[in-house]
Amino acid sequence: MENSLQKDFLGAKIGMWLFLFTEIILFGGLFLLYAVDLSKYADDFHKAGQELNVSIGTINTLVLITSSFFIALSITTLRLGKKKITVYLVALTILSAIVFLINKYFEWSAKISHGIYPNSDHLITLPKGEITFYNLYYIMTGLHAVHVLLGIIILSVVCLLLVKNRVTADNFIILENSALYWHLVDLIWIFLYPLFYLIA
């Protein structure tokens, strides 16, 4: 029985790493596209990047880094048998993700209110490099936001399973895999942040 459980854990881990690999390929392709366009429109990218709200980008970066700490700590507390603290830590991770999306909503709303969104009348009057920058900005940060939303759903399920004792110190693979997914979401943002907000 124990060997069967270990095989299930191993299979679940391998499956998660394969899934994360496909995500890396997806965003890796977008990062490559960004690099090619940056080399073509360096000045336009710099000008467009100055229009983004660095404060919100920085706050969101800190929020995600903190959330990764929460979810990593939750595995340790669960293995120590501190289920209540584990539930709180997962809930704090979810709350951090919600804060991230709220900040992103206000940031996007500000840009949209100024007519800066794909195919807007204002955007198409800008230089081609700036149009490319904003299109990539919406595609890449939007795709990342979808991953954050999926993370909220996944972690909410994990939190419920913790409360129902379906995830325990002896059976925590779903928490571990969810943490891996969340770390990837965090890592992707750590690349997106300097590319769009700190571009030289």
Image: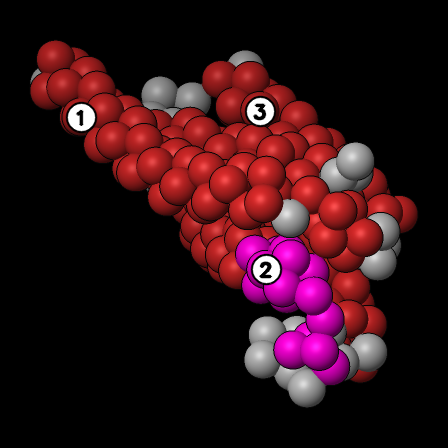
* Residue at numbered disc 3: 72
Residue 102 visible (yes or no):
no
State if disc 2 and disc 3 touch (CB < 8 Å).
no
In the image, which residues are magenta? 122-138
Q: Where, quadrant-wise, is the N terminus in this rendering?
A: top left
Measured as percent of width and height from the top left, residue 86 is found at: 59, 32
Does residue 145 show up magenta in the picture?
Answer: no
Viewer-closest of 97 and 196: 196
Viewer-closest of 20 and 179: 20
Q: Secondary structure at mark 2?
A: helix
Measured as percent of width and height from the top left, residue 173 is found at: 34, 28
Measured as percent of width and height from the top left, residue 130 is found at: 69, 60
Query: Which amino acid type is marked by label 2?
Result: Thr
* Residue at numbered disc 2: 132
Instruction: Give the crowd class for mark 2: few <14, some 14-19, many >=20 residues within 10 Å.
Output: many
**Sequence-wise, which precedes: disc 3 or disc 2?**
3
* Residue at numbered disc 1: 11
Answer above or below: position of 100 versus 199: below
Query: Which amino acid type is marked by label 3?
Result: Ala
Q: Residue at x 21, y 20 (%)?
A: 10
Q: Residue at x 57, y 24 (%)?
A: 72
Measured as percent of width and height from the top left, residue 200 is found at: 79, 35
Query: Which amino acid type is marked by label 1?
Result: Gly
